[in-house]
Image (cartoon, rainbow, N blue to C red):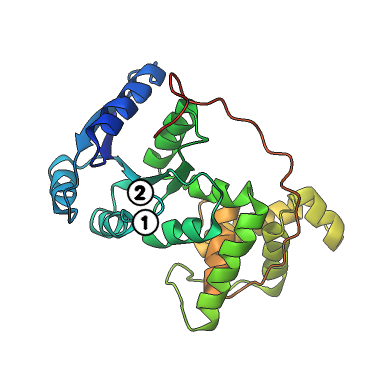
Amino acid sequence: MRKITVMIVDSQPFFQSWLRQALSQEDNLGEIEVLECDPGEDGKNGVAEIAASSPDVVLLDIRYPFLGGLELGKKIARTFPGTRVVVLSTNPEEDGDELFEVIKIGAVAYLRSKESSATELIETIRRASNGEYPINDSLISRPKVAERVLRQFQDMASMGGTIKDITTTLTPKEVQILTHIAEGNPNKQIALFLGMREQTIKNHVSAILRKLNANDRAHAVILAVRKGLISIQPDHDENHRPEKVPLQPTGRLT
């Protein structure tokens, strides 16, 4: 079994040790090796430690409400593409602006520590180390927040902001299907809307993911909105969200 090396980058020793304990208690398979790092005032120590240890995943507290860790997170993501940045926030409220900033720095996951369980954190680390983007779940599971974030990407696109991830032009049908995906519709519902077979929709979705070099449906939506290929007007109900079991013993990651 491959070991996953996780580095906790935080200036508070108590938080580091407590988070290490939470991970250790939940890591029943012994698959995670935890390192601790004080980033220093300017973050240089954090960069040096990452360069020396090459961790698979970095857990970075961005220090709500000042978001001082964002610049360090961006530097880590750009300097060490093999190290996946998972952002932890103590923000007590859902904040589309904060999520937007976290996405921009290149983080692969975003967890509000006050509502995240140790089990969720471990699963996020596993997925991040496997090359997935759990941050997309933060958009799909929160449609109202997703709307704010995606509209900001649309604004960036309208001002000339582009990305290089898209290498092949989508067909009009693919754009239509991707728009339905962005509005939260599953393949079966999209097939009904368009009068097509569900398998045909699945084939189109596969082509979309391949053309956009996207990991999943949510990632494809983000890339397309950044590029200005689609415009969405989601209208969803967020009232039914699964409850989460808080971390033990304190129930918090703070």
Residue 193: quarter of image: bottom right
The amino acid type, in three-letter code, at marker 1 is: Phe
Q: Look at the numbered discs 1 and 2 and tell me whether their residues touch, using CB distance below 8 Å.
A: yes
The amino acid type, in three-letter code, at marker 2 is: Arg
Across the whole image, how many numbered discs are drawn on residues? 2
Task: Classify 10 Å Cα crowding around label 2: few (below 14), some (14-19), many (20 and above).
Answer: some
Disc 1 and disc 2: Cα gap in Å? 6 Å
Provide residue 254's location: percent of width, then percent of height. Answer: 39, 34
Residue 66, numbered circle: 1
Residue 101 visible (yes or no): yes
Residue name at image x 55 percent, y 76 percent: 155
Residue name at image x 70 percent, y 52 percent: 202
Provide residue 198's location: percent of width, then percent of height. Answer: 78, 50
Q: Secondary structure at mark 1?
A: loop
Task: Classify 10 Å Cα crowding around label 1: few (below 14), some (14-19), many (20 and above).
Answer: few
Provide residue 190's location: percent of width, then percent of height. Answer: 79, 56
Kindly identify which residue carries mark 2.
63
Question: Foreground: 151 or 247?
Answer: 247
Provide residue 173's location: percent of width, then percent of height. Answer: 72, 69
Residue 243, numbered circle: none
Residue name at image x 73 percent, y 39 percent: 240
Q: Secondary structure at mark 2?
A: loop
Residue 197 visible (yes or no): no
